[in-house]
C-alpha cells in the first residue's frame, strides 16, 4: 500500500472509532477528500486507495480535473469552495453536490442556471457558524429562511448544511460549533416535513477536528492535509 492508501484507511478507521464512541453507525459517515492543489494523478491514486467522494475548491481546478477524467471511479464530485455567480455555469450540472451555497444571491443564480439546463442541482447551505466577518455563509439566524427559499426553487434540491468553523485553538475547541450546526440541520429537517427525505447531509469536520464533528453528527467529513500531507 502507498502512504496515501494507508492514510485513507487510517482516516476511515478514526471516523469509525469516533462514530462507535457515540453509538453511531460508521456506515452513515462518508470521507470526502479535499483535493485542492492536488494533481489529477494524486486524485486518481486517492480513488484507487478507497476515496469515493472528492471535493474541489476552485472552479478552474475542477474543470481541469474533470477534463482530465481525474475523478473517474469516484462515486461523487462536490464543489466546496466560494463560488462566484459569474462562474456558476461552469459548475452546475457538472458536480453531484455544491456544498458552499453561501448567499441568497448565489442560491438564486444556481437555481436559475439549473433550470436553463433542465436539471436539478443538489446543494447544501453553508453556515457561517462562528459569525466570522472574514467568511461568507448564512448566519445561523438566516439559514432557515435560506432553506425555505431553496425548497421553493425549481432548480435546486436542498440536501443539508455545511460549516467551516475557525481553526481550532485547542482540542475539542470546535465541538460547540458542530453542536450548533447539528441543531440547525435537525431544525431544517423537522420544519420542512415534505422534503425531509431529501435532507440527509451534514458536512462538517476537517483534518484537525473530524472526530469531534463525527461525535456531533456529521455525515460527511472533508479531509485534505490528513490524507495528502501539507499543501505546498
Ligand atoms: C481545504 C478544505 C478542507 C480540508 O482542510 P484540511 O485542513 O486540509 O483537512 C475542507 N473543507 C474545505 C471547504 C476546504 O477548503
Image (cartoon, rainbow, N blue to C red):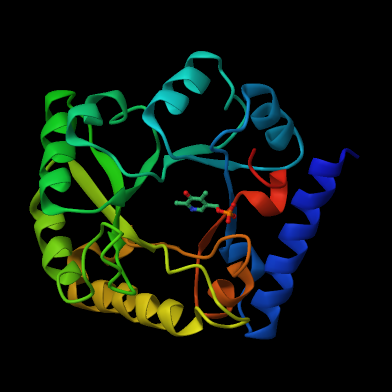
Locate residue 172, reporting x and y percent: 58, 83
Locate residue 182, reporting x and y percent: 39, 77
Locate residue 63, reporting x and y percent: 42, 21
Q: Residue visible at 30% across and 66% down?
A: 128
Q: Residue visible at 56% across and 18% down?
A: 69
- Image height of 153 relative to 15, above or below: above
Where, quadrant-wise, is the N terminus in this rendering? top right
Q: Looking at the image, which residue sits at the far right?
A: 1
Q: Residue visible at 59% across and 70% down?
A: 209
> What is the quadrant of residue 59 in the picture?
top left
Q: Give the side of residue 181 with respect to residue 76, left or right.
A: left
Q: Looking at the image, which residue sits at the far top?
A: 67
Q: Residue visible at 18% across and 23% down?
A: 117
> What is the quadrant of residue 231 in the picture?
top right
- Image height of 5 relative to 104, above or below: above
- Image height of 180 relative to 59, above or below: below
Locate residue 140, reporting x and y percent: 23, 74
> What is the quadrant of residue 109 in the picture?
top left
Count of numbered labels shown in the rendering:
0
Amino acid at each position: 500500500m502507498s502512504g496515501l492508501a494507508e492514510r485513507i484507511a487510517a482516516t476511515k478507521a478514526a471516523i469509525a472509532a469516533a462514530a462507535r464512541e457515540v453509538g453511531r453507525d460508521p456506515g452513515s459517515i462518508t470521507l470526502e477528500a479535499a483535493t485542492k492543489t492536488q494533481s489529477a494523478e494524486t486524485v486518481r491514486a486517492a480513488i484507487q486507495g478507497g476515496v469515493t467522494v472528492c471535493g474541489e475548491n476552485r472552479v478552474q481546478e475542477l474543470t481541469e480535473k474533470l477534463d482530465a477524467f481525474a475523478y473517474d471511479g469516484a462515486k461523487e464530485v462536490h464543489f466546496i469552495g466560494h463560488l462566484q455567480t459569474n462562474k456558476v455555469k461552469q459548475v452546475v450540472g457538472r458536480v453531484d453536490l455544491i456544498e458552499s451555497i453561501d448567499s441568497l444571491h448565489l442560491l438564486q443564480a444556481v437555481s436559475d442556471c439549473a433550470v436553463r439546463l433542465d436539471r436539478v442541482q443538489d446543494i447544501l447551505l453553508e453556515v457561517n457558524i462562528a459569525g466570522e466577518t472574514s467568511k461568507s455563509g448564512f448566519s445561523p439566524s438566516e439559514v432557515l429562511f435560506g432553506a425555505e427559499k431553496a425548497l421553493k426553487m425549481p432548480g435546486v434540491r436542498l440536501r443539508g448544511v455545511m460549516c467551516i468553523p475557525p481553526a481550532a485553538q485547542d482540542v475539542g475547541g470546535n465541538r460547540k460549533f458542530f453542536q450548533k450546526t447539528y441543531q440547525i440541520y435537525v431544525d431544517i429537517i423537522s420544519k420542512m416535513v415534505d422534503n425531509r427525505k431529501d435532507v440527509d447531509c451534514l458536512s462538517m469536520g476537517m483534518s484537525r477536528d473530524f472526530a469531534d464533528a463525527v461525535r456531533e453528527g456529521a455525515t460527511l467529513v472533508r479531509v485534505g492535509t490528513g490524507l495528502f500531507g501539507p499543501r505546498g
